[in-house]
Image (spheres, rainbow, N blue to C red):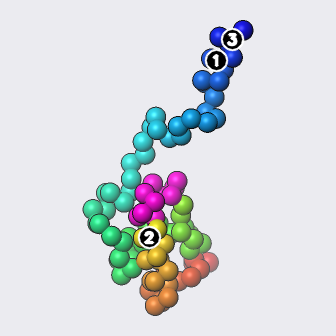
Amino acid sequence: MARAREQSNSGSRRGGRRGQDRTRPRKYTRVNAETVDYKDLNLLRRFLSDKGKTRGRRVTGLSRRHQAQLSVAVKRAREIALLPYVGER
């Protein structure tokens, strides 16, 4: 009985380390840039959805630091009218 409980708990995905068994390739490392620049519109558009929203870290595969740099760069580009606030309709 105890063995059955141990097997059922070890098979579940609850708790423990998440995502450590498989690694997703980072899109940002393929760009080969150290910082995100607000003037690089082709790079910024890759991480925006059709509606103009910034995609999340799980979707983009960016690290926490690069995702923060991306959000600041998108906000700066929108402020000086390089990027639209809403997507195309």
Q: Which residues are magenta?
A: 57-67
Residue 82's disc number = none
Within the image, what quadrant is residue 5 found in? top right
Q: Earlier in the sequence, mark 1 or mark 2?
A: 1
In the image, residue 35 lies at what x, y percent? 33, 70
Q: Residue sitting at 62 percent across and 78 percent down?
A: 89
Q: Do labels 2 and 3 touch, CB within 8 Å?
A: no
**Foreground of the two, 16 or 62:** 16
Q: Amino acid at mark 2?
A: Leu
In the image, residue 21 lies at what x, y percent? 46, 34
Q: Which residue is mark 2?
A: 70
Q: Do labels 3 and 1 touch, CB within 8 Å?
A: yes
**Foreground of the two, 2 or 50:** 2
In the image, residue 46 lies at what x, y percent? 43, 67
User: Element at badge 3?
Assistant: helix
Q: Which residue is mark 1?
A: 6
Q: Residue sitting at 46 percent across and 76 percent down?
A: 72
**3D distance between C-alphas at marks 3 and 1:** 6 Å
Q: Residue sitting at 53 percent across and 64 percent down?
A: 55
Which dot, 2 or 3, sits closer to the camera? 3
Within the image, what quadrant is residue 51 found in? bottom right
Q: Residue sitting at 43 percent across and 57 percent down?
A: 63
Dot 2: within a 10 Å radius of its alpha carbon, few (fewer than 14), some, or many (20 or more) residues?
many
User: Element at badge 1?
Assistant: helix
Q: Which residue is mark 3?
A: 2
> On screen, 24 above or below 16?
below
**Foreground of the two, 80 or 5:** 5
Residue 62 part of the magenta segment: yes
